[in-house]
Image: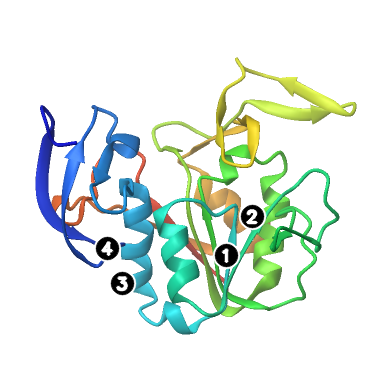
Amino acid sequence: MLAGGKYNRGHCPICACPTVFVELGEWLRDQYLCVLCHSVPRWRAVIEVLDSYFPNWRDLTVHESSPGGASSEKLARECPGYLGTHFFKDVQMGRCRDGIRCEDLESQTFEDERFDLVITQDVFEHLFEPERAFREIHRTLKPGGAHVFTVPWYYWQPTRVRAVRENGGVRHLDTPDYHVNPIDPDGSLVTREWGYDLADIIYRSCAMTTTVVRIRDRAKGIDGAMCEVFVSRKS
């Protein structure tokens, strides 16, 4: 794995031990891997933010929508109050498939004020009504709780809508772009390019204030574009 590539030694926030980080390409967001857990920088950044901002996260109630990868595996393994959910098109909301609960972020079945933390990793760029999802997350968070999330962030431009629901279908406002979806071979359509107004959109939607955390620390394997972690807090 190291042959012919750039690499550095460090300490992985997910593995919680010394490791080697290797660059497999120029797009570090997806190509700068830990050789032990195969995590990418944004996953390590999420765990680093949890360790720094919520050091007792293992004792909290946590909902993660659309989990996947080494960071989600760590959360499920180390946090007894963790619950991961996916959206299955053919399963009733609140029911389970293969032990995984089906939930729609835009219309959840959870009771009010259930969770201390809600985590989403690269989910909100795929929602058609993200404002509804922000409000639902606010509703399900306890007072003082937080939404910790990642999205590709185009900080130099305003948010762009790439696709909308219309007349029972989808109207594309730009060339369709799909990201890999571990539970759907067709992938996930990109509906938003989130821009510099993201925090304002969240505040207008649900009155949560948002902090942008930008980490660049090669010793922890965190580097590259669009690896920001956003922390929106409920008062």
Comes first in the chain, label 3 or label 1:
3
In front: mark 4 or mark 3? Answer: 4
Comes first in the chain, label 4 or label 2:
4
Which x, y percent locates residue 63?
A: 60, 67
Left or right position of 22 against 71: left
Which residue is disc 1 drawn over?
Answer: 208
Q: Amino acid at mark 4?
A: Pro
* For residue 5, above or below residue 76: above
Residue closer to the observer: 187 or 218 = 187
Q: Residue at x 74, y 76 (%)?
A: 112
Do the CB atoms of the residues marked 4 and 3 lie less than 8 Å apart?
A: no
Q: Residue at x 45, y 39 (%)?
A: 152
- Judged from the image, the secondary structure of the residue bearing numbered disc 2 is helix
* For residue 79, above or below residue 48: below
In front: mark 4 or mark 2? Answer: 4
Which residue is disc 2 drawn over?
Answer: 204
Q: Amino acid at mark 2?
A: Arg
- Judged from the image, the secondary structure of the residue bearing numbered disc 4 is loop
The Cα atoms of the two marked residues, 2 and 1, are separated by 8 Å
Q: Residue furthest top?
A: 175
Which residue is disc 4 drawn over?
Answer: 13
Residue 235 appears in the figure? no
In front: mark 3 or mark 1? Answer: 3
Q: Amino acid at mark 1?
A: Met
The Cα atoms of the two marked residues, 3 and 2, are separated by 27 Å
Quadrant in the picture for the C terminus: bottom right
Which residue is disc 3 drawn over?
Answer: 52
* For residue 81, above or below residue 135: below
Which x, y percent locates residue 44?
A: 32, 55
- Judged from the image, the secondary structure of the residue bearing numbered disc 3 is helix
